[in-house]
């Protein structure tokens, strides 16, 4: 199973894993071909928050993303959502039109904690809703 690269991806939490799977299918049907639906332990392994599965180069990239864009906090939240039985969608978007369409569809699916991860920036699109999930204290902002 390949590690998920977050660069140029929208990522979102959908509280019901079955709804997340249906939303992923709808996004693909709308022409967004690179859509990943993460659920459960397999999703946590694919997310690879620490970069351990990817080796030294990936661990270095995770460290740099933590220092430059603070993505580690977000990745810890996505991992906590997966541990809580929720679904996490990752959509690679190559154009602004595809991104806008994906955001509309994610909003329609009641997605939250929707963020776009560019090469050096993170853009918050929809904030977290509901009770916060337990994440290690070092990841609190």
Image (spheres, helix red, strand yellow):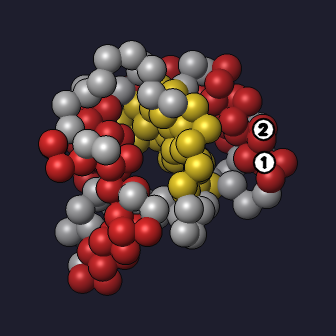
Task: Give the residue at mark 2.
Answer: 101
The spot of residue 82 in percent (x, y) is: 30, 35
Give the quadrant of residue 136.
Answer: top left
The spot of residue 87 in percent (x, y) is: 41, 31
Pick the residue in front: 86 or 80.
Answer: 80
Q: Residue at x 28, y 58 (%)?
A: 48
The spot of residue 107 in percent (x, y) is: 65, 24
Give the quadrant of residue 93.
Answer: bottom right
Q: Is residue 43 visible?
A: no
Q: Residue at x 15, y 42 (%)?
A: 137
Q: How many callouts does the rendering have? A: 2
Cα separation, mark 2 vs mark 1, equals 5 Å
Q: Is residue 111 visible?
A: yes
Residue closest to the far right: 97
User: Residue 140, labelled with which disc?
Assistant: none
Q: In this image, 20 relative to 23: left or right?
A: left
Task: Give the residue at mark 1.
Answer: 98
Proximity of marks 2 and 1: CB atoms separated by less than 8 Å: yes
Q: Is residue 71 above or below residue 99?
A: below
Q: Residue at x 43, y 37 (%)?
A: 88
Q: Residue at x 25, y 42 (%)?
A: 140
Query: In the structure shown, which secondary structural element does the residue marked by tag 2 occupy?
Result: helix
Q: Is residue 135 above or below residue 95?
A: above
């Amino acid at each position: 199973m390949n590690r998920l690269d977050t660069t140029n991806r929208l990522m979102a939490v959908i509280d019901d894993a079955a709804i997340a799977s249906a939303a992923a299918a709808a996004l693909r049907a709308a022409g967004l071909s690179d859509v990943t639906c993460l659920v459960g332990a397999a999703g946590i392994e694919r997310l690879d928050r620490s970069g351990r599965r990817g080796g030294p180069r990936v661990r270095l990239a995770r460290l740099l993303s933590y220092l430059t864009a603070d993505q580690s906090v977000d990745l810890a939240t996505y991992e906590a959502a997966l541990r809580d039985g929720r679904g996490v969608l990752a959509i690679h978007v190559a154009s602004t039109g595809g991104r806008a369409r994906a955001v509309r569809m994610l909003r329609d699916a009641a997605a939250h904690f929707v963020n776009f991860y560019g090469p050096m920036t993170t853009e918050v699109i929809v904030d977290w809703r509901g009770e916060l999930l337990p994440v290690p204290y070092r990841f609190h902002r």
